[in-house]
Image: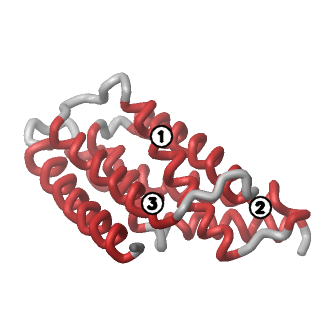
């Protein structure tokens, strides 16, 4: 394979890891979006998330850390649950949110590494494939953010009823799914 083919393949794999196959990832990004639907703020938070998951993905894919999936997968579900609850409990972004999102990004990156291990990366293309995969994930995240903004945020986020009619019900639904995943991932990986 040529370098161009590797880049194209892993860009696509990163993107499809979010859309359409990354339902948990989509719910996490939406949870970030719902607390503050300001696109700039959400993109900054998602970029911090991407930086963190790129770091842990690289370290895990290179074999420097070997996290047990029976711990990582429930933690990913718990991160979604946490952000959905945060949307219900808080009215604005707290100063510590970026740190929390960075930590969650580290956890999600370890989960992404298992997807890359299943695919396999040829050693001579490792860095190109890894960087391309991360860019693909970032493009997927931006697509989710922009879709949420143009379908919901642009039209409703300034309405007085936005939190009550959109954020609370959607975050509650996301939280219920995440709670189910947490329980299932704990008991199915024992």
**Residue that sits furthest to the front in the current view:** 190
Dot 3 or dot 1: first in sequence order is 3
- Residue 171: x, y in percent? 21, 52
Dot 3 lies on which element?
helix
Q: Residue furthest top?
A: 95
User: Disc 2 versus disc 3: distance between alpha carbons?
Assistant: 26 Å
Left/right of residue 176 with respect to residue 51 in the rendered view: left
Location of the C terminus (image quadrant): bottom left
Which residue corresponds to mark 2? Answer: 129
Q: To which quarter of the image does residue 1 belong? A: bottom right
Alpha carbons under labels 1 and 2: distance apart:
24 Å
Q: Residues within 10 Å of mark 2 (few under 14, many from 20)?
A: many
Q: Is residue 166 visible?
A: yes
Dot 3 crowding, Cα within 10 Å, few <14, some 14–19, many 20+: some
**How far across and down, in percent of the image, does residue 21 sit?**
48, 73
Return the mark for residue 73.
Answer: none
What residue sits 58% from the left and 64% below the top? 15
Q: Which residue is mark 1?
A: 103
Q: Secondary structure at mark 2?
A: helix
Can residue 150 be seen by looking at this rendering? no
Does 184 sit left or right of 39 as displayed? Answer: left
Task: Please tell me which of labels 1 and 2 falls first in the chain.
Answer: 1
**For the point 86% across and 63% down, which residue is it?**
125
Q: Residue at x 50, y 54 (%)?
A: 108
Rendered image coloring scheme:
secondary structure
From the image, tell me which residue sits under label 3. 71
């Amino acid at each position: 394979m040529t370098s161009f083919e590797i880049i194209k393949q892993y860009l696509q794999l990163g993107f499809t890891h979010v859309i359409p196959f990354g339902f948990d990832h989509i719910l996490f990004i939406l949870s970030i979006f719902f607390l503050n639907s300001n696109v700039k703020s959400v993109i900054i938070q998602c970029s911090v998330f991407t930086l963190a998951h790129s770091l842990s993905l690289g370290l895990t894919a290179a074999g420097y850390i070997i996290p047990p999936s029976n711990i990582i997968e429930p933690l990913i579900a718990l991160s979604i649950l946490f952000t959905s609850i945060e949307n219900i409990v808080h009215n604005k972004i707290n100063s510590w949110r970026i740190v929390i999102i960075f930590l969650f990004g580290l956890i999600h990156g370890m989960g992404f590494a298992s997807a890359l291990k299943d695919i396999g990366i040829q050693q001579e293309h490792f860095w190109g494939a890894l960087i391309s995969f991360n860019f693909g994930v970032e493009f997927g995240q931006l697509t989710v953010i922009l879709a949420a903004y143009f379908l919901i945020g642009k039209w409703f986020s300034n309405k007085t009823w936005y939190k009550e009619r959109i954020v609370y019900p959607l975050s509650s639904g996301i939280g219920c799914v995440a709670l189910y995943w947490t329980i299932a991932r704990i008991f199915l990986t024992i």
